[in-house]
Image (cartoon, grey):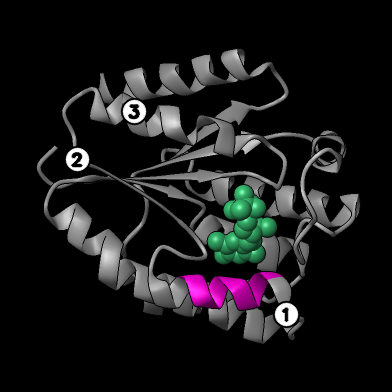
């Protein structure tokens, strides 16, 4: 895998993606790859500072979209592109599909602007594989109720997360070869089986 591999993990808050990130990284490590585990918004000092603002300060939708893409630009330049260039596997907890799902779907922000920002910021870079942990919004809300204090997104209602899911579905429909659709309703072990089957199918 000399050219590196860019794997992203997506899903609404409470879908359970965090549960499987360590196993996902380990799967590649066990096959001898350097693995860079990272997240968005975040992944660099500057981008983590922007994350704090996006998750906890109120702001208008364009400001929010610009900040997540500003964070993404720094993350790509400082971490993701150098890692891919040296042949590493980058496993990223959320990426641009989350902007289309949350800012575009959830907030109803203009997708045309998001496509423009995506083009500027990524210069053609896209994940090689995106695992979408798909869980109905009502079930994710039940799971979140047991978790910690919500941020600006986690505090949204079920209708918001239904629009986020629709945003993910539109991204998947536009690029089916990149996506693996994971049914996140199952028990964690059964969810991991789906993830592993997808990895084996693609990377042996
Ligand atoms: P999340 O990845 O769920 O982290 P944690 O597990 O620590 O809660 O939180 C990030 C939040 O940011 C999530 O609610 C989705 C949101 N988000 C956007 O709105 N746009 C984006 O482009 C990204 C990457 C995330």
Chain part drawn in magenta: 48-55
**Residue 183: which numbered mark, if any?**
none
The x and y percentages for residue 73 are 38, 75
Image quadrant holding the N terminus, namely: top left
The residue under the point 41% across, 30% down is 24
The part of the image, by quadrant, that contains residue 188 is: top right
**Residue 26: which numbered mark, if any?**
3
Provide the secondary structure element on which disc 1 rests.
loop
Image quadrant holding the C terminus, namely: top left
First in sequence: mark 1 vs mark 3: 3
Disc 3 CB within 8 Å of nearest ligand 1 atom: no
Horizontally, residue 150 falls left or right of residue 72, namely right
Residue 112 visible at all: no
The residue under the point 38% across, 79% down is 120
Provide the secondary structure element on which disc 2 rests.
loop
The residue under the point 76% across, 70% down is 108
Is 166 covered by the magenta stretch?
no
State the residue in front, 128 or 144. Answer: 144
Give the CA distance from mark 2 to mark 3: 10 Å
Give the CA distance from mark 1 to mark 3: 35 Å
Mark 3 crowd level (few <14, some 14–19, many ≥20, 10 Å Cα)? some
First in sequence: mark 1 vs mark 2: 2
Horizontally, residue 185 falls left or right of residue 121, namely right
The part of the image, by quadrant, that contains residue 47 is: bottom left
Reading the image, the residue beneath label 2 is 34
Residue 105 visible at all: yes
Count of numbered circles on the image: 3
**Residue 57: which numbered mark, if any?**
1
């Amino acid at each position: 895998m000399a050219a590196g591999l860019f794997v992203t993990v997506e899903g609404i808050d409470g879908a359970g993606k965090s549960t499987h990130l360590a196993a996902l990284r380990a799967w590649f490590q066990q096959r001898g790859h350097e693995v860079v585990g990272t997240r968005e918004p975040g992944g660099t000092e500057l981008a983590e500072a922007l994350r704090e603002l996006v998750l906890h300060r109120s702001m208008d939708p364009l400001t929010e979209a610009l900040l997540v893409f500003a964070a993404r630009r720094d993350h790509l330049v400082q971490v993701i592109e150098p890692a891919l260039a040296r042949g590493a596997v980058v496993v990223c907890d959320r990426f641009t599909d989350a902007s289309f799902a949350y800012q575009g779907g959830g907030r109803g922000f203009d997708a045309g602007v998001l496509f423009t920002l995506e083009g500027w910021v990524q210069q053609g870079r896209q994940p090689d594989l995106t695992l979408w942990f798909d869980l109905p919004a009502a079930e994710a809300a039940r799971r979140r109720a047991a978790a910690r204090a919500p941020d600006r997104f986690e505090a949204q209602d079920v209708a918001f997360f239904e629009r986020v899911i629709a945003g993910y579905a539109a991204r998947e429909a536009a690029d089916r070869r990149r996506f693996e659709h994971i049914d996140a309703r199952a028990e964690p072990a059964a969810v991991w089986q789906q993830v592993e089957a997808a990895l084996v199918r693609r990377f042996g």
